[in-house]
Image (spheres, grey):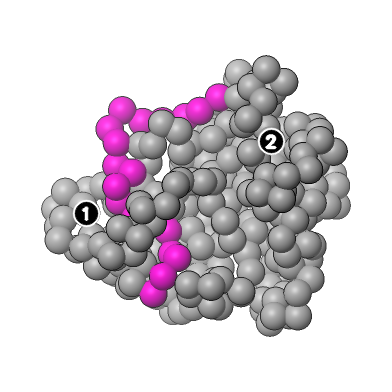
Amino acid sequence: MTTAVIIQARLGSSRFPRKVLATLEGMAMIDHVVLRAKQIAKVDHVLVATTTSKQDDELYAYCRDKQYDVFRGSEMDVLDRYCSATHLLKADTLIRITGDCPLIDPKICEECLDIFCVQEADYVGNFYPPSFPHGLDLEVIRAEALFLAEQACHDPYGREHVSPYITDHPHDFKIVYHSQAENWNHLRVTVDEPEDLELVSEIMKRKGIHASCADIVCLAQETPDLFALNHEARKRAESAAYTPPKD
């Protein structure tokens, strides 16, 4: 089995443009995501999947300069971008993470991959029921399931968000969700707005750049007021319906 981590990333965020190149503890945010992805056991490839839009020329050049594997595909048809990248890598299984999650936990990724293999699943996600801090979201998808979704999905929303066709058809795909006993999903450690970056920076200063989910939860228990840094961003996010992560 060939397993690839494919990181979707772009510079055109409406709320925080160029966020994946924002500096976080002396490194670009995308560096943290790639570094963590490379720590996931049993992974053969780590690829940044950006877009063919001119505004992403800078990100593409940055990744090439850092010698990251990088691919360019459709900006809005992210399902097609993932399928094209998966074909390029000849991967059987892909782990989907996003460039705005610099605290993605390799251990949780490994747990999801193990569940995927043991249960012979087509899809494993860790965001339902909500339990992990928001920003540690990932999906493990069988390439065959992804390609079937690409052929069958004609809904723009489904093509932008990659996995809805699969999760909306549980009779056609074996879907498994991974959660933990305690719900810490109210902790927001994704970077969607500048105040999110401020919080993640503080977490890394206090727990190190390799801070894990356990470290984040421990910090929230020790210094709950710290997580008020992105309170307004969290409220804005909670006012909208939850969807799997975007770029």
Q: Is residue 15 above or below residue 132?
A: below
Magenta region: which residues?
A: 176-194
Query: From this viewpoint, is residue 12 visible?
Result: yes
Q: Position of residue 211 (x, y in %)?
A: 36, 56
* Secondary element at image label 2: helix
Quadrant that contains the N terminus: top right
Give the amino acid type for the residue marked by disc 1 in the picture. Leu
Q: Is residue 116 left or right of residue 220?
A: right
- Location of residue 124 (image quadrant): top right
**How many numbered callouts?**
2
Q: Position of residue 205 (x, y in %)?
A: 29, 69
Q: Which residue is mark 1?
A: 219
Q: Does the magenta stretch mainly form a helix, a strand or a loop?
A: loop
Query: From this viewpoint, is residue 213 visible?
Result: no
Disc 2 + disc 1, Cβ < 8 Å: no
Rounded to the nearest angstrom, the CA distance separating label 2 from label 1 is 37 Å
Is residue 182 a member of the stretch shown in magenta?
A: yes
Image point (78%, 62%), residue name: 74
- Mark 2, Cα crowd under 10 Å, few <14 / some 14-19 / many 20+, is many
Q: Is residue 233 above or below residue 165?
A: below
Q: Position of residue 194 (x, y in %)?
A: 39, 74
Give the amino acid type for the residue marked by disc 2 in the picture. Tyr
Image point (61%, 74%), residue name: 12
Q: Which residue is mark 2?
A: 165
First in sequence, mark 2 or 1: give its number. Answer: 2
* Secondary element at image label 1: helix
Image point (43%, 64%), residue name: 191
